[in-house]
Image: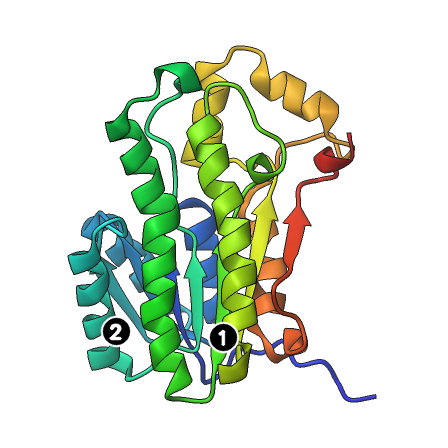
Amino acid sequence: MEKLNFTLKGKVALVTGGSRGIGRATALGFAEAGADVVVASRKLTDLEKVAHEVMERGRKSLAVAAHLGRMEDINNLIIEVHKAFGRIDILVNNAGGSPAAVPTIDVDERLWDSVMNLNLKGLFFLSQAVAKMMKNNVGGKIINVASGDAFRPESRVGTYSISKAGVIMATKVMALEWAQYNIRVNALVPGNVHTRLGDSRFVVFPGYEKEMISRTPLGRIAEPEEMVGAMIYLASDASNFVTGEYITVDGGISLT
């Protein structure tokens, strides 16, 4: 049997939302697996710290400030990456969030647009731009970060849940249409993870953390680094015959 290849040596990866949480952990994990890594998010100072950590691991890195809900920022990001590396082999669409916890009956257009622009519109158009680069090379891997909320709606974050359900369908559509270009598109579905967004729910909703832990068969909240193994699998040649799928990393909470 041919040995499974989990190395990312010689690859160029772009990780959005790369300044903290799952994005930072993924960027550093990819660097340790051999990839050069571009990190993007809104705040350049935070990104530069991660880029420095990547370089400490012996890889090249680039930090680019970009609001992924804005087309001009997406276009500039692509230009900067192409200028520095000439290609993108792996894209991780990790940028996302929800600025407020509001019942759907009270959601206004501004909040809706804010969530959808970042979580879905930005993901779609960045993937499209990167796919055009990958098409002209030898293909590549796109990993979309969804959420357990895509399958099980939660009160007061309904808009976020809708956007993440859209991420799952976007993953399937891209996988189907772009397979002809040797582009594989898959999704990671995290459960509760100690990130700024995840922990903010524990503050807003008293008792929520205790409830989530009690419902999770593994009995705890995940750390961002625990998402990296699945990320490396989906980014590496080990998953070359996998596309249009999602991997759930949630400690078993989806079973309850």
Question: How many numbered circles are shown?
Answer: 2
Q: Residue furthest top?
A: 206
Tag on residue 147?
Answer: none
Q: Which residue is mark 1?
A: 178
Secondary structure state at the residue bearing disc 1:
helix
Residue 55 horizontal/vertical position (percent): 34, 70
Dividing the picture into quarters, in which one does residue 191 lie?
A: top right
**How crowded is the residue under tag 1: few (<14 C-alpha within 10 Å), some, or many (20+)?**
many
Q: Is residue 248 left or right of residue 52?
A: right
Tag on residue 81?
Answer: 2
Task: State whether residue 54 is above or below residue 168.
Answer: below
Dividing the picture into quarters, in which one does residue 74 lie?
A: bottom left
Residue 164 horizontal/vertical position (percent): 49, 42
Q: Earlier in the sequence, mark 1 or mark 2?
A: 2
Between 13 and 24, the one lying in front of the other is: 13
Between 29 and 188, the one lying in front of the other is: 188
Residue located 72% across and 80% down the image:
4
Task: State whether residue 54 is above or below residue 131.
Answer: above
Residue 139 visible in the shown view? yes
Q: Amino acid at mark 2?
A: Val
Secondary structure state at the residue bearing disc 2:
helix
- Quadrant showing the N terminus: bottom right
Q: Is residue 66 left or right of residue 137?
A: left
- Quadrant showing the C terminus: top right
Residue located 33% across and 76% down the image:
60
Residue located 40% across and 20% down the image:
101
Q: CA distance from mark 1 to mark 2?
A: 21 Å
Labels 1, 2: front one: 1
**How crowded is the residue under tag 2: few (<14 C-alpha within 10 Å), some, or many (20+)?**
many
